[in-house]
Amino acid sequence: VIDAPDPTGRARRRAVSYAIDETHDETLRAWVASANTEDTEFPIQNLPFGVFRRREASGAAALVQRMETSRFVGAAQRFEDARVGVAIGDQIVDIGVAAALGVFDDAPDADLVRDAVVACEAWTLNPLMSLGRGPARALRVALSRALRIDGPDSARARDLADRILVPMSGVDLLMPVDVGDYTDFYASVHHATLVGSLFRPDNPLLPNYKWIPIGYHGRASSLVVSGTPIVRPTGQRKGPDEAMPSVGPSRALDYELELGVYVAGENAIGVPIPIGDAEAHLFGVSIVNDWSARDVQSWEYQPLGPFLGKNFATSVSPWVITMDALTPFRVPRTVRPSDDPAPLPYLDDARDRAAGGLEITLEVALRTPAMRASAYEPAVITRGSSAELYWTFAQMLAHHAMGGCFMRPGDLLASGTISGAAPDARGCLLELTKRGAEPLSLPNGESRKFLEDGDEVVMTAWAERPGFRRIGLGRCEGKIVPLSV
Amino acid sequence: VIDAPDPTGRARRRAVSYAIDETHDETLRAWVASANTEDTEFPIQNLPFGVFRRREASGAAALVQRMETSRFVGAAQRFEDARVGVAIGDQIVDIGVAAALGVFDDAPDADLVRDAVVACEAWTLNPLMSLGRGPARALRVALSRALRIDGPDSARARDLADRILVPMSGVDLLMPVDVGDYTDFYASVHHATLVGSLFRPDNPLLPNYKWIPIGYHGRASSLVVSGTPIVRPTGQRKGPDEAMPSVGPSRALDYELELGVYVAGENAIGVPIPIGDAEAHLFGVSIVNDWSARDVQSWEYQPLGPFLGKNFATSVSPWVITMDALTPFRVPRTVRPSDDPAPLPYLDDARDRAAGGLEITLEVALRTPAMRASAYEPAVITRGSSAELYWTFAQMLAHHAMGGCFMRPGDLLASGTISGAAPDARGCLLELTKRGAEPLSLPNGESRKFLEDGDEVVMTAWAERPGFRRIGLGRCEGKIVPLSV
């Protein structure tokens, strides 16, 4: 319980820094050559956490893990061989092996590093997240020192390279977190306005939007890691001109481009998290695709909100980019026109105002079966930025917990669809095609109203800024398959 | 994965019986005297499952368990001394101890009983629920035989009574299940119509209501066991006549009287659960109080549904009454006027039509601080029946999974507020007081629009029918306390 008086020194773990430190130095290079290429997503300035397993057999390993690691089937069935790792170039540092071999023995903040290493002896990142941000940050510094060329603690690591590094090409990346509760927000005012105009032409942006970070509870069980096939859901739907609803595979399957943040630490049930403390509870981010069946959603969503239109699957990218890695890409709280109401005090904080935003560019590419057959590159159909969100993650978390809702380590808060003001910055097909009324033309001559079977959606994201090394978030991809029973 | 071909014989575990068997015999009596009194909730015909811990210290033990048993804080912090038990009169059978002492050695279906016993070596009922209904039913038969006077296997159990029985007075009842996902439905048409008329006078019952078992995703982290104090949530709210929203403790705190069912077994993600299989996935029921902050809810709920108005706490009763214990109380599917549309085929099944309903009476009593001070009995303010629900639990589950949503063992599906047609059968204060417009008069001269600090809400429920022994569901209670920081 992080917000209680804490004689054990946990408060120290809460400290949040917006300061650039040695790990962000643009000139750092790693002794892992692939981390120094121009186009790598994982230079030494990134160091994201994930969970991997050495590949033994091909097949839908990711899906299997999602099922088998469910805590409900009993510990004996969990993957004994799932490991916590950190990406560097095209390699992964096996944290447990590196620690056992003494790679972190001379790192600063030895006690915090030790806590982090113990927490990494797990098959998810939840234990690490339960410690707050401090231990993961200390481990990040230790890794940076161990991996950099001529780093203070790099000699031993370099000597042991073949034991502590695992090539990404030989592993399956697994669900990084066992998400207890998943919440999806609605933080893009452009998305809320555009979608609102499609569902409620007379009343697009509701009066509560600029006061409340609107969100709803998603379905934690249906979170899957990137690469898991997405079965087209069967659903009940009724068009406005149809006399009665019908049942069948969704005819309006869509993606939603989102960014998600995982919670660090926890509150006590009944006790809010003040906005000033919220940033200390943000561990790191991943790309999220909140797949949506628009026909199901529009028929079911009143009065209690989206349900089956959203809960068949939500994909997440496998690497969790820490907030510490993202320090150079913090920007002032997002655009709020001066005639909009000021945030209520529980959502307002000087630090959040100055640096609560995140400048991350996100892109959606579509690859159809015809493109695969004719060697067309996937077509980029959307590019947006999280800097255009109306609410910050700190505001979303402070709002979420204001009534005492119990937030647990690893809970996932997603932004909602990230749409910008520009026509090509709309983060879902619903908006891009105006609910199918204006089909999207693809470079190979095809068009799409919504997703068809065999279509692959590939989301990527990155952060860049002059004076800093560009870092990537990895990929969040999924292919639509029909139900086969 | 229960719906796949199953060479291991798991299919056998799925078998559902609506037949009355030896465990339902009205004339059975237990050698535990307290199980034979007229007013006991736990006669030998009931045998509900729960999780308990011998009490060592007083205090908010239930709350502590909710936090400590969270899987996210690491196994080491879980209660080593939480035990799975079955209620009999004012005693609890410690399943692990009874099995170790050989009490079930001569039971029929020895392999299923053994599976159940192994699954009960846990600190929640999730492993038992993961096996489907078969093993728990076999254990129920074994317990009935071991506990009845002159039962076929009762001699050994009776000799060992002081080792296998634990008095309820000496234990804390803990959260019985670690709920992965919690869904709240809206299955009472009376509730939907009445609440709809308060929130949308022009449009009370939406056009989808009679086609879809409407539901939304609740917040699993905020589920607490009966007896946990409920902190009045702080929230953002705006009355229709107010120029802007304000923040403060909810002024319209309410209870919702519900019945919840826990899921047995699981599907595979992407694969529906047909209506004919749904009953095999219903493990048993508990009483649920979905506490609600009406002022917060009405300001926030459009367009994505209830969020902070519901997620600060939801209470559940500690005993899970198995569907097998409830066999005598099955009734035809609930009232659907003949001019209402027939359920779509995926929601229609002959067995569900004939016996999908449950006749359970539920009651709400309110005890105010003034009543406690002057020795007034709690005032019964609502009595309803689950037989009046518009949708059955099988229909709710089949709908929930129709698009492939992953349902895990121990997931909780609650009915939504149970309101009947009668004025005193309204399952929340919102309805009883018409949103505060007609305060409720209490027998001691007090009145209530909504709940005040210090008020206790006590929900009880039971099933009875001529020719069968009455069984109780236990209690779901909670006391409102102000936030103290």
Image (cartoon, coloured by chain):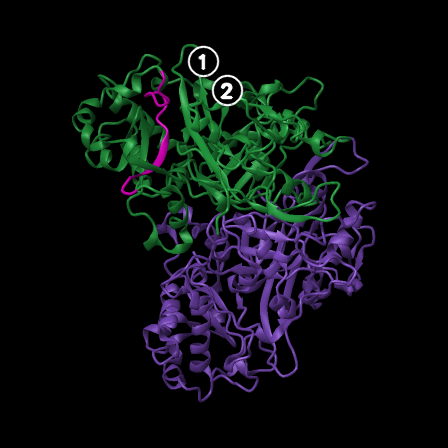
Chain colours: A purple, B green
The residue at 40%/80% (across/down) is: A161
Q: Marks 2/1: CA distance?
A: 9 Å
The residue at 52%/77% (across/down) is: A89
Is disc 1 placed on a helix, strand or loop? loop
Q: Are marks 2 and 1 on the same chain?
A: yes
Q: Is residue B40 magenta?
A: yes
Q: Are marks 2 and 1 in contact (CB under 8 Å)?
A: yes
Is disc 2 placed on a helix, strand or loop? loop
The correct choice, above or below, for B169 with respect to A107 in the image is above
Residue A207 visible, this angle? yes
Q: Which residue is mark 1?
A: B465
Q: Quadrant of residue B452?
A: top right
Q: Quadrant of residue A483?
A: top right
Where does the C terminus of chain A fall, quadrant-wise? Answer: top right
x, y percentage for residue B146?
Answer: 25, 24
Highlighted range, magenta: B39-57
Where does the N terminus of chain A fall, quadrant-wise? Answer: bottom left
Number of residues whose C-alpha sits closer than 10 Å to that of mark 2, classed few (under 14), some (14–19) or many (20 or more): many
Residue type at tag 2: Glu
x, y percentage for residue A152?
Answer: 41, 86
Residue A166 visible, this angle? no
Q: Which residue is mark 2?
A: B359
The overriding secondary structure of the stretch rendered in magenta is loop
Number of residues whose C-alpha sits closer than 10 Å to that of mark 1, classed few (under 14), some (14–19) or many (20 or more): few
Residue type at tag 1: Arg
